[in-house]
Image: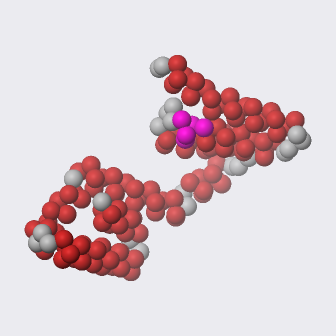
Amino acid sequence: MTGKSWLALLSGPLLGTFVFAVLTQQGWDTQACATAAIASWCAIWWILEPVPIPVTSLIPIALLTLFGVLTPAQIGASYGSPMVLLLLGGFILSTVMARSGAHLRIALSMVNLFGEQQQELSFWFHGGCGVVEHVDFQHSNHPDVVAGRSSCIE
């Protein structure tokens, strides 16, 4: 690791410790101080990215339990909320479509099917995305909607 990498890696825990100490000196509740410290640690690591963002997102699971702010069940319920899982599923599907080239195959198939005239292609493309979203929303298959919309935007 380079010097900048080490500095970025250490800045999160150091800022968290500093925030905890300052807030404790101000008379804040220990759990509130721990929460603010963990949030500042995560914020710095999200900005500087010394470790991958998914690793950073796991820090609260360990530290909020360690400091007694929340129980593991409460933290698990937050991470397993339907909205988080919806977005996660959509991002996974979008990433898989992009890495596999499926979005390009879909786009080329539409060009072959509807022709190369820009106005007609745009009409059919956006119309198709709207139909996919309508059908997916009717069947509550939200990750497909997110993936479909992301492929339409590209």
Q: Is 16 rendered above or below residue 146?
A: above
Whether the magenta-drawn stretch holds residue 46 is answered as yes
Q: How is the image coloured?
A: secondary structure
What residue is drawn where x is 84% and y is 45%? Answer: 29
Nearer the observer, 103 or 92: 103
Residue 5 place in picture, x, y as percent: 51, 25
Residue 99 place in picture, x, y as percent: 27, 49
Residue 128 place in picture, x, y as percent: 26, 76
Left or right: 79 with respect to 111?
right
Q: Main secondary structure of the magenta part?
A: helix
Q: Residue furthest right?
A: 27
In which image quadrant can residue 60 be found? top right
Quadrant of the image for the C terminus?
A: bottom left
In which image quadrant can residue 132 be found? bottom left
In which image quadrant can residue 135 be found? bottom left
What residue is drawn where x is 61% and y is 42%? Answer: 43
Judge whether residue 147 can be spotted in this image.
no
Residue 31 place in picture, x, y as percent: 78, 45
Whether the magenta-drawn stretch holds residue 83 is answered as no
What residue is drawn where x is 47% and y is 37%? Answer: 52
Q: Is 10 rendered above or below residue 130?
A: above
Magenta region, residue range:
44-48
Labels in figure, total: 0
Judge whether residue 91 can be spotted in this image.
yes
Q: Is 104 rendered above or below residue 58?
A: below
